Each structure stands twice: as C-alpha cells, then as structure tokens.
Amino acid sequence: MKQFIILSIMMLNVCIGKAQYLIQSPDEKVKVTLHTKTTRKKNSKFSVPSKMTMKVFNDKQVLADNEIGLTVKSEGKRTEFGKCHIVKSYRGIRQLDTQKDITDLTGRYNSILLKTEEGITLEARVYNDGVAYRFGVSDYEGDYKILDVCNVFPEEKAIAILGTFTGDYVMPWRTMKIDTMEAEAANAVATTTTKSDAADRGTRIVPWKDALSTMSVGTAFSWYSGDGVWGNISQDHNIAVDFTYKYIYGGVSFVPCHSTQYIHWDEEKNSKYSAPFKNVMGDIHSWNFGVRAGFCLPVQNGYEVWNFIPYVAASVMHLKQHGDTREGYSGLSKHNHYLVGPGVKIQCSLRGGLSIGAAYEYQFFTGRNTPTGMNSLTLSLGKMF
C-alpha cells in the first residue's frame, strides 16, 4: 500500500510537470496544444511552472510554436502568466460566436478558458478556419501595467509595455486565419490579424504614465585632453551608479584614491604650466566625485525599451600629495578643481528587465592652468522595474 501511494504521488508530479491542454476545431483538422513547462526549485523535489507555449497544427503541419504569456506589474511586483498556477479550466464545445466579436473567423468553435490564482485568464478558440486567443486581467486594486506580451502567431508583434490600466481589462482577440484551398489543403497558409489597439503601435515613445524606472551600476574609463598642462596625466577608472524615473535621469560617480602623476617642475622653464605644482615633488593622488542630471526619452520596439538620455555632468577633483613634503620643496598651491560638461547615454532594457548601457561625456575644467577637459566612457549593467 505504501509503495502504491508513493507511485501515485510520483505519477501526479509527472502529470503536473507536463501539464498540457488540447483544443481542436469542430472538423478536427486544426489543433492547438497549450503546454506548461516547469523547472525544479533549488534544493527541492518539486517543480514550478516556468512558461507556457502554444503550438498550432493544421493536420500535421505546425503553423506556430511559441511562448504565450504576459507580465502584470502591480505595486512593484511582477506576475508572469507562464509562472502562474492554473486553478480552473473551462471547455466549450461547438459554440457559435453570436456576438461576432471575432470577424476574421467564422462558424462554430471549440474553446478553453484558463484561470490563474493571480487574476490572469487566457481564453483560446479553435475554428475550422483559424485560431484566436486573448488575455484578461482582473481583481487588481489600483493601477497596474501589462508588460512583455509575447508574439505567438506569425507576424504578431512582441510588446514591451502594453499600457497602464485600472480595473478589469480584457485584451482584444489576436487571431490567425488558416486559408485552405481544396487543391492545396496540405500547404495551408496562416495569416495573422489583430484588432487595432495599444498592442499594435509598433515602435513608439512610451507615455509618461506607462514608463518604467531603471537602476544601473557601471564602470567608467577616463582620459584627459589639453596642451600639455599638468604633463602626461594617467588614465583613471571610476564607479558610476545611475537611475531613471520615467523621463527623469540622475546619477553619481566616484573615483577612489588614484595616482595622477609624478611631478618635478623646473619653474624657470615651465613656469607657464607649473600651477598648482610649482616647486612640488612627490606622488600626487586624486579622488573625483561627480553628479549627473538629464532627460530620458524611452522608446519601445518589440520586447526592448531604448532610453535615449542627454545629460549634464559636473565633478570635483581633489588633488593631494601623499607623504610628507620633501625638504626644499613645497606642497600643492591648489587642491580642488571643478569640471562641467555634456554627456549622452543609450540604454537598452531587454525582456525580463535586464538593461545594458553605454555613455560618453566630456567635462571642461573651469579653472586656469589645467587640462582642457576630461573624456569618460561608461559601460553599465542594470535592471528595469
């Protein structure tokens, strides 16, 4: 008896791990399978849903085989349909679309409605001449965003940000029509159509209410330019942290203690360029602190959101001589130098929120007897949320 119970539990886990729904057209030629793929939790024997795929057949020909899903962001939490547990499923047999809410497909259909415990539903219909599906979102308090809508059918568009909604929302039907002719029944052609809504805007500027935030950490490589002032200054590397909030951009950077150069000025020959190192000999170190502020223009294209960010940067460089001043020489005449200048950053956020970015800026020294400016190239990695 004990062995029977253990075997039953194992079989139940296998069934859950391969959860699959089959819907077919009334004439049984068009078939759709919804398959839930699972992954095993770390340090656990149990599996959890990871994503759902939809496969469409016309006889034995596969017309589509892609992930089907979306993400709902509410109160800072992301809920992915493919990772939700299906709590209820309803089937409809040989129904008739009396409301004509799908004009591309005709006749009777078989359907399935899947409900998750997180308030996301999926309804799929299979006609003799095509397939349709739509998502619904319900039972969310306050505003929520719909993100990462998959492209399931041929020519369908992936969507990074569908929009911001309040209350229950049902997406328009997304359909795939199967054009079959008697002489070419084995070579069916699938065409995708969707009702015009926010899902089909293609490349667009993300509105303020729909825009997301990002935070990233990067490293910058800096080098100096000028007419030989301060001699051959070495390059330095800094740590940069920045963020965007919808259309607003800000950031900070810091260069820890860094050896700038070894100085020994001959004041008679180099008096023009000697400040602030006049009569200085020794190891000169510096640290830099910078701030950035600017404007962020988010543009979505498919799953990606591109942030185009012009900004202004300002920095303070503090010079310090390490060790004691040598006998016969003096210390630095000026310790703090200030810089300001423009910069631009391009950042791409991929599906799931991972973002990569690159920035270039040029800051001018504001004082006299200094290099002309400092170039900086920054590479960053972050998260969109």
Image: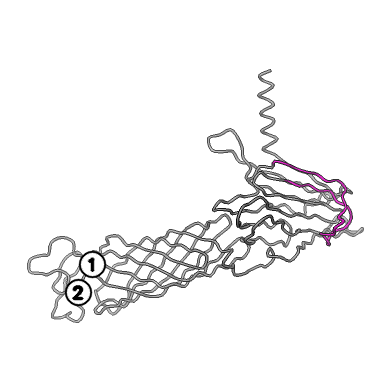
Where's residue 288, x and y in %? 30, 65
What residue is shown at x 17% (from left), y 70% (from top)?
A: 332
Contact flag, marks 1 and 2 (Cβ < 8 Å): yes
Residue 199 vs residue 349, the one in the foreground = 199
Kindly identify which numbered label has been placed on residue 60.
none
What residue is shown at x 21% (from left), y 79% (from top)?
A: 273
Q: Is 328 on the left or on the right of 374, as rendered?
A: left
Instruction: Indicate the amino acid at tag 2.
Output: Pro
Where 141 sits versus 300, above or below? Answer: above
Instruction: Indicate the amino acid at tag 1.
Output: Leu
Helix, strand or loop at disc 1? strand
Q: Is 378 on the left or on the right of 277, as rendered?
A: right
Kindly identify which numbered label has been placed on residue 319.
1
Where's residue 122, x and y in %? 72, 50
Where 134 sits versus 248, above or below? Answer: above
Marks 1/2: CA distance?
10 Å
Q: Is residue 298 magenta?
A: no
Residue 284 picture quarter: bottom left
* Quadrant of the image containing the N terminus: top right
- The residue labelled by disc 2 is 276
Q: Is 237 on the left or on the right of 90, as rendered?
A: left
Q: Residues within 10 Å of mark 2 (few under 14, many from 20)?
A: some
Magenta segment: 87-114
